[in-house]
Amino acid sequence: MSDAPAFALHPDLERDCVPVCDLDLCRVLLMDDANYPWLVLVPMRSDKRDFHDLTRTDQQLLCDEITRCSLAMVELYGPDKMNVAALGNMTPQLHVHVIARWTTDPAWPGPIWGKVPRAAYETTALETRIGELRGALETA
C-alpha cells in the first residue's frame, strides 16, 4: 500500500471547471467560460506543480494528451490557432490550458486572461460542448 496522498483537484479548478473525461494521465476539464473552447488537463498525480516534477514517462504521456486534446478541438471547432500553456502562478497544482483561438476572438492576438469577463455556459450549451468533446476524445 502506498503512502502517497490521493489525487484531488485544487479548489480553484473544482470551482472554475467542469469535468469532461479522464485520459490515461490527465483529468480533462472544461473551463466554464463560453468565450473560448478551453480545456484544462490535470495530471492525476499528487503534489505536482511543474512539468519537470513528472517522471519522464508521464512527461511524454502529458505531451501526447495535449496533442490529442488539441487535435480534437481543431477537428470540432476549426480554430485559427491552438494555445497551450502551463503557468500555475495562481493555482499551484500542475495543469495545462489548451485553448482554441480565432483572429476574431475578443482577446486576439493577446492572451485571454483578463481581457473580457468570463461568460458561464448556459446549461444546454455546456451539455452540448461536453458531449462533443467526449465524443472527439474517444476517437482521437
Image (cartoon, rainbow, N blue to C red):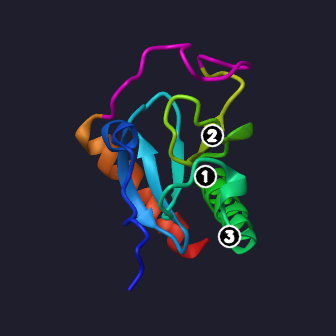
Residue at left 69%, top 53%?
Answer: 51
Q: Amino acid at mark 2?
A: Ala
Residue 131 in view, yes or no = no
Tag 3 and tag 2, C-beta contact below 8 Å? no
Q: Write down the region rendered in magenta.
A: 106-121
Q: Nearer the viewer, residue 42 or 20?
A: 42
107 magenta-colored: yes
Q: Which residue is mark 2?
A: 100
Residue 27 locus on image (x, y percent): 46, 61
Residue 127 locus on image (x, y percent): 30, 50
Q: Amino acid at mark 1?
A: Met
Q: Which part of the image, by quadrant, shows the C terminus? A: bottom right
Disc nearest the viewer among 3 and 2: 3
Q: Residues within 10 Å of mark 2 (few under 14, many from 20)?
A: many
On screen, residue 135 versus residue 58, left or right, reads left
Q: CA distance from mark 3 to mark 2?
A: 21 Å
Residue 3 locus on image (x, y percent): 40, 74
Q: Which residue is mark 1?
A: 73
Q: Residues within 10 Å of mark 1 (few under 14, many from 20)?
A: many
